[in-house]
Image (cartoon, rainbow, N blue to C red):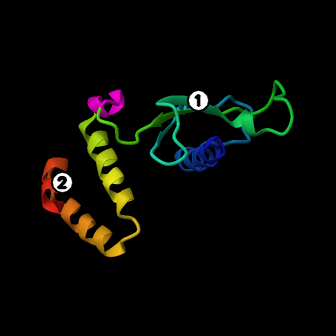
Amino acid sequence: MPYRMLGYTAKTFERMYRVVNFFSTKQQKLIVPEFCVLFNGTPALPDKSVIRLSDSYITALPENSAEIVVKTLDVDYNKDKEILKRSPTLHDYSRFIQKDSFNAAYPETLKRWLKLAVKAETIEEFEASIS
């Protein structure tokens, strides 16, 4: 994930700072990037973890090297998970993905679910429509 974030950051900075002269001797001011991944896959991760780009380096991290630290939050559905309690949108997304993962082997079911999900206003309405 940190490697992917390095690529995203380079592309984003390229677009954001098109008018900046990167060859200037004057120091350029940049926004401070923060990296966070909402993870809902396998293997299961702790609710909160940190992954560093330097964990993937072949040799020890020299003082003048790049480091990216990514905060990872596991958002797999669990009704007691604190982050899902704080965000109704994230809760509903996580619940939908959990239901979807049970039926991923059935493409027709998935197509029907996606149509119903687009029409539904809430996760409760969606769940009622598939019951």
How packed mark 2 is, by other alpha carbons closer than 10 Å (few <14, some 14-19, many 20 or more), is: some
Residue 12, x across and y down, in percent: 55, 47
For marks 2 and 1, give the one nearer the viewer: 2
| Residue under pointer 1 | 50
Q: Please state if 12 lies on the left or on the right of 40 as rendered.
A: right
Quarter residue 86 falls in: top left
Q: Which residue is mark 2?
A: 127
Which residue is pictured at 55% across the width and 45% down the height? 43
Q: Position of residue 110 (x, y in %)?
A: 31, 68
Mark 2: amino acid: Glu
Give residue 98's position: percent from left, percent from top. 35, 51
Specify few, some or many for label 1: CA neighbours under 10 Å numbering under 14, 14-19, or 20 or more. Answer: few
Left/right of residue 68 with respect to residue 87 in the rendered view: right
Residue in view at x 31 percent, y 54 percent: 99
| Residue ID at (40%, 42%) | 76
Stretch in magenta: 80-86
Q: Main secondary structure of the magenta part?
A: helix
Viewer-nearest residue: 37 or 82 = 82
Name the secondary structure under disc 1.
strand
Residue 1 circle label: none
Label 2 residue SS = helix
